[in-house]
Amino acid sequence: MNPFDLTGRVAMVTGANTGLGQSLAIALARAGADIVTVARRDAGETAAAVEAAGRRCLQLTADLSKMDGLPGLVADTLAHFGQLDILVNNAGIIRRADAVDFTEADWDDVIDTNLKSVFFLSQAAARHMLERRSGKIINIASMLSFQGGIRVPSYTASKSGVAGLTKLLANEWAGKGINVNAIAPGYFATNNTEALRADENRNRDILARIPAGRWGEPDDLGGAAVFLASRAADYVQGHILAVDGGWLAR
Ligand code: NAP
């Protein structure tokens, strides 16, 4: 028996149309899981890759900054697949401005999408998972779950919050069959980091600090997600797994 095999599991991935979410969905499909993509725009490219891996894909549309649609995502998944085994809370946004100029809208938008919806979608999924005493929840944290960052106050607050929430939910649900863990990506080349990579000085400083000597590519993250979603991680709880090319070790 391959402890990393996800055959017969159903995994929901938020923000699965692009970037890390797309890569995570495809990695879980290649490990055997059927996939539910949650995105506010078309996730057809991801669905095609999931189906090319021989798995089924259900595409759901939602604006994750609004809480009222979250329970419906779980209900639609259950109506289609009859179960939900894995939830990857990946969708997230970032806003950059000096703290002294930061607006309330940039605070609320980021906190709602990156933190509030992570909690309420996890809650909706857990109501199903607790009944079955089985489930894996994987939150996408950040280096700013550990560090302060600069010019991203709501993002740092949200990702530090995700780390705390991961531990709280693990404390409540570990004895009830649900594993809650997080992956903290280092610096990955996606839309989220476009502004950093476009800034010559920031790009140079970041690269100089990464022991691996390069930005992460979305495919670098899949193995960690497959592990945390699998039986191999049954006794792993409340952990924040850095996949960062060594950034935090520096
Ligand atoms: P990305 O390419 O910008 O992808 C973000 C995803 O979240 C997109 O699918 C986006 O949809 C979706 N999303 C944002 N707001 C949404 C909303 N209100 N409703 C539904 N979907 C929404 O960035 P990424 O780098 O892949 O980010 C994925 C996760 O990794 C985020 O939580 C991010 O904070 C985290 N992360 C990234 C890095 C990095 O270096 N890239 C490092 C640490 C953590 P649209 O395409 O419609 O915008």
Image (cartoon, grey):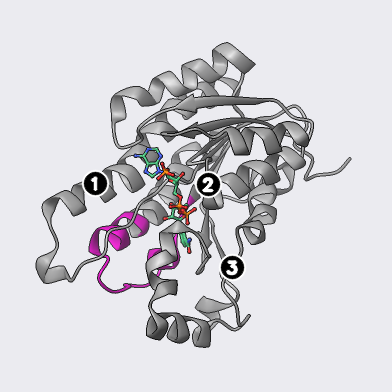
Q: Quadrant of the N terminus?
A: top right
Real-space Cα separation, disc 3 to disc 2, in angstroms: 15 Å
Dividing the picture into quadrants, the one containing residue 136 is top right
Real-space Cα separation, disc 1 to disc 2, in angstroms: 20 Å
Q: Is residue 88 visible?
A: yes
Which mark is first along the chain, 2 or 3?
A: 2
Residue 250 as seen in the image, left or right of residue 199: right
* Residue on which disc 1 sits: 109
Q: Position of residue 228 (x, y in %)?
A: 64, 48
Q: What residue do we see at 74% from left, 29% from top?
A: 55
Please tell me how crowded label 2 is: few (under 14), some (14-19), or many (20+) other residues with Cα within 10 Å. many
Residue 98 as seen in the image, left or right of residue 16: left
Real-space Cα separation, disc 3 to disc 1, in angstroms: 26 Å
- Looking at the rendered structure, the kind of residue marked 1 is Asp
Question: Which element type, helix, strand or loop, lies under badge 2?
Answer: loop
Question: Which element type, helix, strand or loop, lies under badge 1?
Answer: helix
- In this view, the residue in front, 50 or 238, is 50
Q: Magenta region: which residues?
A: 140-159
Whether label 3 lies within 8 Å of ligand 1 gets the answer yes
- Looking at the rendered structure, the kind of residue marked 3 is Gly
Whether label 2 lies within 8 Å of ligand 1 gets the answer yes
> Which of the two discs, 3 and 2, sits closer to the camera?
2
- Looking at the rendered structure, the kind of residue marked 2 is Thr
* Residue on which disc 3 sits: 216
* Residue on which disc 2 sits: 18
154 is within the stretch colored magenta: yes
